[in-house]
Image (cartoon, helix red, strand yellow):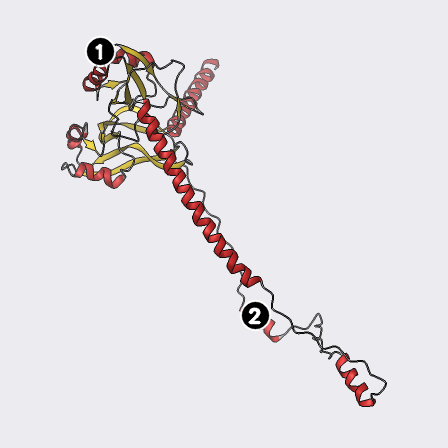
Amino acid sequence: MTAPNDTTAAPAAAAAPAVATTTPEEEGFRVYVGNLAFTATEEEVRAHFVKAGGEILSVILPTRFKSRRPAGYAFVTYKKEEDAKNAVEKLNETEIGERKISLEIARSKEENAERKAAIIAERKETKAATKTDTEATATEGEKAGDKADKPKKKKAAKTARRRGPDDGEDAAADVDAEAKPKKTKAPAKKTDGETSEKEKSDKADKKPKEAKEPKEPKQRKPRLELTGEVSKDTVFVANLPFSVDDAGLTELFTKLSIKVKSANVIRGLRRLPGRRPFHGSKGFGFVELEDPTQQQEAVDKINGSSVGDRKVTAKIAQEMKPIELAEATGETVKEEAKEVKETKEVKASA
């Protein structure tokens, strides 16, 4: 079996951890089904792959760990390798639930095990090297600290000599001078009304703090929903490599002589196994064209083209509208209908 080129889209490194359904997976040759609609069912996937022929052992639609929602991909296991390859050739870029699926031969369990072992070994080597560097740095720090912590020897303080029986008055004066410490003048205490000239000048130089203006709260973007209407100048592009940004998406169109008004790769929170959640590309985006007459031409040229190790899909986008706006419009219509109803009742009673 051949491993898929796309390590990101392949099942061994999916965008988020997923658990398989309760259907047990049998030994065979697996086909990875990418860009699958979240609403697709096991029966729909099986019925679609029956068209290519061959004996299907199992159909598995993984779900995400926490939400238990569909992961957006599936595995179809065939008994024979030639049937799996035949399904990829015949059904790649066909539609299930109005979405074009991308098919690849999945990695075998042995290939996944070797890849996982290589990753673990690399992590261990990196961890060992980091630990060695840390220990060496700590040893150097301890040596430098030992030298700095050694206290300096203090000179012995002179002690007053007691007057002996043979000493005269001069010796007594010397003892008193050595024994009595010198008095230092304490700073004069300030009265409540007194302030030094320095303090007066400091107070004069200080400017009163300006009151900070309250920050305006950020306006939350309204949620959007599909209207069912087809856009006149926008193209939807899916199955993009995660490394492609807005500029890369624009370049993809301009190379094909298609003028782009704006390109937007959708970004959001992503979760990968063994990593903290981070913001990154979702693998799809929208391109608004300067010339609406080039919309169908753009779809025909972009759809099925290769970007990196992936074949991207393109189709005419659908219009979106804010959900809040739709709700507000609905409430206004209800209020107007209520007022009309009340007016009719008043006229009828009169």
Q: CA distance from mark 2 to mark 1?
A: 89 Å
Q: Residue at x 42, y 21 (%)?
A: 68
Residue 156 position in % (x across, y down): 68, 74
- The quadrant the N terminus occupies is top left
Q: Residue at x 40, y 28 (%)?
A: 328
Image mark for residue 202:
2
Q: Nearer the viewer, residue 262 or 152?
A: 152
Residue 332 position in % (x across, y down): 41, 26
Q: Is residue 68 above or below residue 119?
A: above
Marked residue nearer the N-terminal end (2 or 1)? 1
Labels 2 and 1 touching (C-beta < 8 A): no
Badge 1 crowding class, 10 Å Cα cut-off, few under 14, some 14 to 19, many 20 or more, is few
Q: Is residue 233 left or right of residue 171?
A: left
User: Mark 2 or mark 1: which is in front?
Assistant: 1
Q: Nearer the viewer, residue 123 or 87?
A: 123
Which image quarter: residue 192?
bottom right
Badge 2 crowding class, 10 Å Cα cut-off, few under 14, some 14 to 19, many 20 or more, is few
At label 2, the amino acid type is Asp
Residue at the spot of label 1: 51
Residue 120 position in % (x across, y down): 38, 34
Q: Is residue 65 left or right of residue 86?
A: right
Residue 306 position in % (x across, y down): 19, 31
Residue lying at the far right in this picture: please name it.
Answer: 165
Residue 223 visible in the snapshot: yes
